[in-house]
């Protein structure tokens, strides 16, 4: 017979890791899985690598487009080590029935604590110093992290208002949170905490609505706030201060950016211990902190 014999298929589930991964996350993946590494920046290599893969683990910079998803005919899950969707084609994964997990939930406590730290620092270390009590905190984004920030800042006596792009989150807000349209929120808030990942949401138009005494923080919200428009607003006296953490992911208060939690979620998915919600068939993103399906 001419040519090389076909490669033997691994008896263990194949996990392809494209990009950098923390040692702890690599250790969490290793037992019982056939872990293979490839260069996520090399599209051809990535397409070839996923052919036998049950799971693909990528960093936030690696594109997972329709070509990659189609090539990974055995894929069950794409795990993104970033806090947001990164460069994963969510429509393509939905069509293929591939679950997507990320580090967002794993990092929520550290991210919330960082937000609180920035808010307190903005009050105490930016002239003129102000008290948080009775001030209005406007939270842009009622995710788990945004809700956690609201709970913690209410302990300082702040009044909390919020906006979220998702109607279900606005409807499900705590009775202690006043839900407002985004423009109204920006206009009334003394402090603004950006907790969403929508690119370009806080631009020149949004910043034109804030109070000149307002203080804005945007931890790990790279690309959400227009940096040039923010700088102009501060320099022109239309905003007191804008404090951001531009490291993206990691940098959210967790030792490895939540990578270990994501790696453990991959293991549980491949062991059928985590199943996608039937209501999430068309939106395959799942929460890495879900309990095992059989509990």
Image: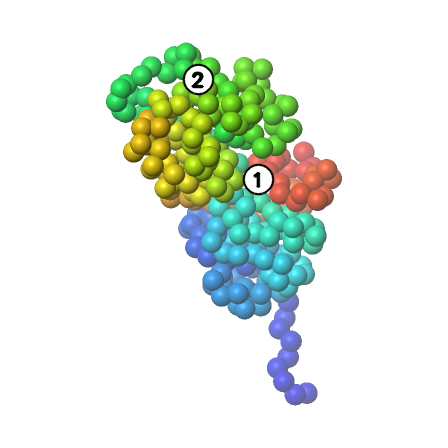
Residue 136 is labelled as 2
State the residue position of label 1.
288
For the residue pair 115 and 293, the one nearer the viewer reads as 115
Locate the C terminus by quadrant. Answer: top right
Q: Residue at x 61, y 32 (%)?
A: 166
- Counting every numbered tag in the picture gives 2
Within 10 Å of the Cα at label 1, are there few (<14), some (14-19), or many (20+) other Cα atoms? many
Q: How is the image coloured?
A: rainbow
**Residue 277 occupies quadrant:** top right
Q: Is residue 230 visible?
A: yes
Q: Is residue 157 above or below residue 100?
A: above
Mark found first going from the N terminus, 2 or 1: 2
Task: Spot the residue most to the right.
Answer: 278
Locate the N terminus by quadrant. Answer: bottom right
Q: Position of residue 27 (x, y in %)?
A: 47, 50
Q: Secondary structure at mark 1?
A: loop
Q: Is residue 113 visible?
A: no
Q: Does residue 9 appear left or right of residue 162 in this picture?
A: right
**Residue 53 occupies quadrant:** bottom right
Q: Does residue 50 appear left or right of residue 17 in this picture?
A: right
Q: Position of residue 22 (x, y in %)?
A: 42, 50
Q: Is residue 113 above or below residue 20?
A: above
Q: Does residue 77 appear left or right of residue 110 in this picture?
A: right
Q: Residue at x 70, y 52 (%)?
A: 95
Within 10 Å of the Cα at label 2, are there few (<14), some (14-19), or many (20+) other Cα atoms? some
Q: Position of residue 39 (x, y in %)?
A: 47, 63
Q: Nearer the viewer, mark 2 or mark 1?
A: 2
For the residue pair 53 and 172, the one nearer the viewer reads as 172
Q: Position of residue 73 (x, y in %)?
A: 67, 61
Q: Residue at x 48, y 46 (%)?
A: 82
The answer to the question of whether label 2 and label 1 lie on touching residues, with beta carbons closer than 8 A, is no
Q: Secondary structure at mark 2?
A: strand
């Amino acid at each position: 017979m001419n040519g090389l014999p076909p490669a033997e298929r691994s008896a263990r589930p194949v996990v392809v890791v494209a990009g950098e991964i923390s040692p702890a996350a690599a250790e969490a993946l290793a037992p019982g899985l056939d872990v293979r590494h490839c260069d996520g920046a090399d599209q051809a290599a990535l397409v070839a690598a996923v052919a036998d893969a049950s799971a693909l683990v990528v960093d936030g910079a690696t594109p997972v487009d329709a070509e990659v998803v189609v090539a990974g005919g055995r894929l069950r899950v794409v795990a993104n080590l970033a806090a947001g969707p990164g460069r994963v084609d969510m429509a393509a994964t939905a069509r293929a029935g591939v679950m997507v997990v990320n580090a967002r939930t794993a990092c929520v406590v550290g991210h919330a604590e960082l937000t609180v730290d920035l808010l307190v620092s903005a009050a105490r270390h930016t002239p003129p110093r102000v008290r948080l009590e009775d001030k209005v905190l406007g939270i842009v984004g009622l995710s788990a992290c945004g809700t956690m920030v609201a709970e913690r800042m209410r302990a300082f006596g702040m009044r909390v208002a919020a906006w979220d792009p998702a109607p279900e989150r606005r409807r499900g807000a705590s009775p202690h949170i006043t839900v407002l349209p985004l423009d109204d929120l920006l206009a009334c808030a003394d402090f603004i905490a950006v907790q969403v990942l929508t690119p370009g949401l806080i631009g020149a138009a949004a910043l034109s609505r804030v109070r000149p005494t307002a203080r804005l923080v945007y931890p790990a919200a790279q690309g959400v706030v227009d940096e040039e428009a923010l700088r102009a607003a501060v320099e022109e006296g239309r905003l007191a201060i804008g404090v951001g953490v531009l490291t993206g992911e990691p940098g959210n208060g967790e030792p490895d950016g939540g990578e270990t939690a994501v790696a453990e979620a991959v293991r549980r998915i491949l062991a059928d211990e985590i199943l996608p919600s039937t209501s999430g068939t068309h939106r395959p993103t799942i929460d890495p902190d879900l309990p095992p399906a059989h509990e």
